[in-house]
Image (cartoon, rainbow, N blue to C red):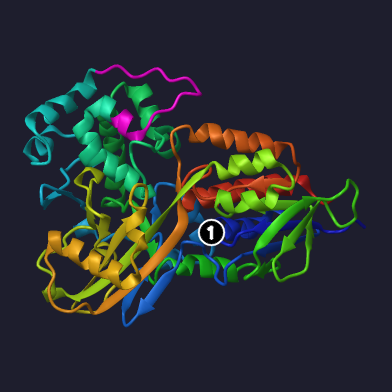
């Protein structure tokens, strides 16, 4: 009888946990051993919920995109369907900070693209020249792009709708997800649907109008507009905690940094790969999968393939911090009647955005209180992170107060830092990913997937993990 197929997963974030879970299904009936090795003491990566005196703070992602089905399907499979919540319907709007005040986003936007004339004519965000330039989207011919061509978000939106819209509206909305700069992020890697929309409809406005009509028809069937984002009643940690607890046979080891991956001689009875783990015994595997940030997997695989290591290290990540502030509701002047606001980079302010957490989700603050989150860092903004936690919290209060007006003492303060954890799919990203895949193909049994590699966000992490589990399952026992 042949020995079990050994799979080693490096990284215990959402991708790694989803892969371990998926492998238990695809390898059902196949003798196998799955081991997940996480460098830190905690599973979940950027997903972490902190609860204190009724305040529920999601340090990293607070939700996932509902239109991407993989995370929702997995949550339901895990028995979390009754825990799923959408954003509060009355507050499904966003503000943009401009000219010293907050401006409500015009109605009828889809991915920041205008679909109605009236709301755009009435907004103070743009001059009349900028509004007229928007209308040219209906006339500007689509750019012919070959498979190797790419363009930044700012260049793409500026070409279609004008530079002012790229700077103050669409760019901040789209690039804010990555804490990145719209002038650097790849439109093809981040929002390929917009590139496809331009090619299909010849106009972003026409394309988004069609999408809005389709969404409205589906909403009518359900009796109301569905939330674009989904979270969990007790916070996002429930997703990773439940996922980890549902693993039946996989071995999960925390505080286990993998420092080196080496290829074993052909026919070695221990497997194809040897992994060196800090403060632990060497581990052997037939399949090794990296799910950490790409640069963190580059070091361990350098002994296998220096060119692969260089390709992984070429992917860019930035550091961010989130500051949570809890107030008594009466101490905040603004109604907080939205999910929050975004700050265009051209304003040169230290903050990137603010989420009004208790206005976005139910169950996030005790009665009579509000909870807000302020974002710092990202591309071009990492220097502000040199401040200590107390200084960063005070800066968050000052920045927030400039737009919503706050008084009194904070009832809750918490700072979270994410060092080089936000992937930046820069222009040319798809080419860099293709290079990594080419190098991996030279080493059967060595794989990589993760946030920002082939899509970004929790649903894409789950999608990559499940696809790779099928590939590994097809291989069968050694």
Q: Nearer the viewer, residue 307 or 408?
A: 307
Residue at screen point 63% across, 47% down: 448
**Within the image, what quadrant is residue 319 found in?**
bottom left
**Within the image, what quadrant is residue 355 found in?**
bottom left
Is 203 a magenta residue?
Answer: no
Is 156 a magenta residue?
Answer: yes
Magenta-highlighted stretch: main secondary structure?
loop
Left or right side of 312 for 429: left
Q: Residues within 10 Å of mark 1 (few under 14, many from 20)?
A: many
Residue at screen point 66% across, 40% down: 308
* Relative to 378, residue 56 above or below: below
From the top left corner, tell me how far across and down residue 414 is, in percent: 33, 73
Question: Which residue, given by chain and number where applicable, does mark 1 sit on?
Answer: 14
Residue at screen point 69% across, 41% down: 306
Q: Nearer the viewer, residue 414 or 69?
A: 414
* Relative to 468, residue 374 above or below: below
Q: Residue furthest bottom?
A: 53
Q: Which residues are magenta?
A: 140-157
Q: Residue furthest right?
A: 1
Element under label 1? Answer: helix
From the top left corner, tell me how far across and down residue 214 is, in percent: 31, 37
Can residue 114 be seen? no
Can residue 310 be seen? yes
Residue at screen point 9% across, 35% down: 118
From the top left corner, tell me how far across and down residue 382 is, in percent: 36, 54
């Amino acid at each position: 009888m042949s020995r079990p197929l050994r799979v080693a997963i490096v990284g215990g974030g959402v991708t790694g946990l989803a892969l371990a879970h998926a492998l238990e299904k695809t390898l059902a009936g196949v003798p196998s051993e799955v081991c997940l090795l996480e460098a830190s003491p905690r599973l979940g990566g950027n997903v972490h919920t902190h609860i204190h005196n009724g305040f529920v703070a999601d340090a990293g992602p607070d939700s996932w995109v509902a239109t991407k089905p993989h995370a929702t399907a997995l949550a339901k499979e895990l028995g979390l369907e009754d825990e799923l919540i959408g954003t509060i319907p009355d507050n499904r709007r966003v503000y943009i900070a401009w000219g010293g005040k907050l401006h409500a986003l015009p109605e009828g936007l889809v991915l920041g693209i205008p679909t109605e004339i009236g709301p755009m004519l009435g907004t103070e965000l743009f001059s009349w020249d900028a509004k007229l330039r928007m209308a040219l989207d209906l006339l500007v011919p689509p750019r012919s792009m070959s498979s190797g061509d790419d363009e930044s978000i700012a260049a793409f939106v500026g070409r279609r709708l004008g530079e002012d819209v790229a700077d103050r509206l669409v760019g901040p909305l789209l690039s804010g997800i990555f804490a990145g700069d719209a002038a650097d992020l790849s439109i093809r890697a981040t929002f390929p649907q917009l590139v496809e929309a331009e090619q299909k409809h010849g106009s972003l406005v026409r394309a988004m109008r069609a999408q809005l009509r389709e969404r409205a028809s589906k909403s009518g069937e359900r009796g109301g507009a569905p939330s674009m984002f989904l979270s969990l009643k007790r916070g996002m940690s429930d997703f990773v905690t439940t996922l980890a607890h549902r693993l039946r046979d996989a071995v999960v080891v925390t505080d286990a940094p993998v420092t080196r991956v080496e290829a074993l001689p052909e026919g070695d009875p221990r497997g194809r790969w040897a992994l060196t783990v800090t403060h632990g015994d060497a581990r052997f595997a037939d399949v090794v999968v990296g799910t950490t940030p790409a640069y963190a997997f580059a070091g361990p695989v350098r002994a296998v393939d220096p060119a692969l290591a260089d390709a992984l290290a070429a992917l860019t990540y930035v550091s961010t911090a989130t500051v949570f502030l809890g107030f008594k509701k009466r101490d905040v002047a603004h109604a907080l009647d939205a999910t929050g606001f975004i700050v265009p980079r051209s304003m040169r302010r230290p903050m990137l955005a603010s989420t009004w957490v208790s206005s976005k989700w139910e169950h996030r603050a005790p009665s009579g209180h509000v909870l807000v989150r302020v974002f710092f860092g990202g591309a071009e903004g990492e220097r502000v992170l040199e401040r200590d936690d107390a200084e960063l919290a005070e800066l968050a209060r000052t920045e927030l107060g400039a737009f919503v007006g706050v008084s009194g003492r904070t009832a809750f303060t918490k700072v979270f830092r994410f060092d080089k954890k936000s992937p930046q799919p820069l222009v040319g990203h798809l080419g860099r990913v293709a290079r990594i895949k080419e190098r991996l193909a030279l080493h059967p049994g060595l794989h990589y997937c993760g946030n920002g590699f082939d899509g970004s966000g929790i649903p894409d992490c789950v999608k990559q993990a499940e696809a790779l589990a099928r590939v590994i399952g097809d291989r069968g026992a050694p």
